Amino acid sequence: MRIDLMAGATLSAALPAQASEPVILVFDSGLGGLTVLEQVRRARPDAHYLYAADDAAFPYGRLSEPQLVARVIAVMERLLTRYAPDLVVIACNTASTVVLPALRQRFVTPFVGVVPPIKPAAALTRSRLVSLLATPGTVARAYTHDLVENFAADCAVTLVGSQNLARYAEAEMAGAPVADAAILAEIAPCFVTGADGRRTDVVCLSCTHYPLLLGRFERLAPWPVIWIDPAPAIARRVVQLLGAALAARPEPPAARAIFTGGGGLNPALGRSLERRGLTETVVEALPLAVS
Ligand code: DGL
């Protein structure tokens, strides 16, 4: 892993000046968006990728809606000016469920968001008992409640706001294992049995961090369920907007990770990033101004 402390350089200098392949920026509060990056990269392996984690403000789940909108606009202002991507994926439910209208109003760059996969959940469930596992922020959003009302009105949807799972996923990526009991305590409320014996059979992974822990969820689940990760659908949306890959490359271009804080960077995290094709790490200091 190479770590650069950027003062004022621009990545565009490091990208081919006449690149015909698009530059795609994948953005999250932390490492969760890596699960989306992976799927988008698979769909457009020819593109140039930037991954930006607003770790200085992590977790977004604790910010009020006005704080979050102001923060994401400020960070995006900086990233768009510096890197001029062709498309941005807001790989964060907590942000997408509240900031997308403001982003689209402010910037001309196309944005693709990630929101809870309620519609596919309603199509897949047989028991009509669905759970939505998300941050407390996403669970509280009017946007989420509207999705449930519009697409799963005939299901009993249990909204589970997890205080800790995003943090646990970050810890695991940085080489600090989290105990099974701690993870089970967070997912247990998703497993509901009705008076008639019906049981939850679909759980929406409505925070992009959670697929990082999917293997653990499957192992610890009290009974098997379908876990829905919206990332493949996001990748399809990106292809719809940008078109299919131009040509197969012998080797995918190196991708760069940008952190607004960088406090959690360590060798274990560097290896996790490298395994995901992020070979360069840059810290663009952007301290959180809100209290
Ligand atoms: N990965 C983010 C999401 O999809 C949020 C984690 C957080 O910052 O609270 O909701």
Image: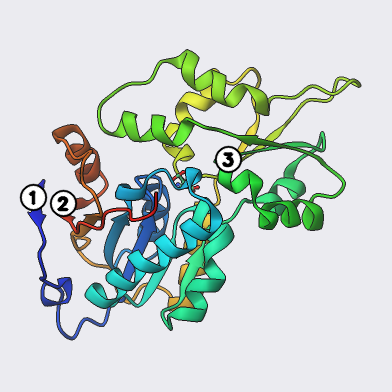
The residue singled out by tag 2 in the image is: 279
Q: Residue furthest right?
A: 196
Which residue is farthest bottom?
18
The three-letter code of the residue at mark 2 reads Thr
- Write the residue at 83% across / 42% down: 155
- Tell me the kind of residue under disc 1: Arg
Label 1 vs 3, first from the N-terminus: 1
Q: Secondary structure at mark 1?
A: strand
Q: Amino acid at mark 3?
A: Pro
- The Cα atoms of the two marked residues, 2 and 3, are separated by 32 Å
Earlier in the chain: of badge 2 and badge 1, it is 1
Residues at discs 2 and 1 in contact (Cβ within 8 Å): yes
- Residue 54 screen position, x and y as percent: 33, 53
Quick one: label 3, few (<14), some, or many (20+) residues within 10 Å? Answer: some
Q: Considering only vertical position in the picture, is 90 above or below 196?
A: below
Label 1 crowding class (10 Å Cα cut-off): few <14, some 14-19, many 20+?
A: few
Query: Which mark, residue 136?
Result: 3
Q: Nearer the viewer, mark 2 or mark 1?
A: 1
Regarding mark 3 in the picture, which secondary structure is present there?
helix
| Count of labels in the image | 3
Left or right relative to 99: residue 23: left
Q: Residues within 10 Å of mark 2 (few under 14, many from 20)?
A: some
The residue depicted at 40 percent of the width and 45 percent of the height is 32
Residue 278 coordinates in the image, percent (x, y) = 21, 52
How far apart are the alpha carbons under marks 1 and 3? 35 Å
Query: Would you identify the image quadrant in which residue 135 lies?
Result: top right
Q: Position of residue 13 (x, y in %)?
A: 11, 76
Q: Is residue 191 left or right of residue 150?
A: left
For marks 2 and 3, the one nearer the N-term is 3
Q: Disc 2 and disc 1: Cα gap in Å? A: 7 Å
Residue identifier under label 1: 2
Eye-nearest disc, 1 or 3: 3
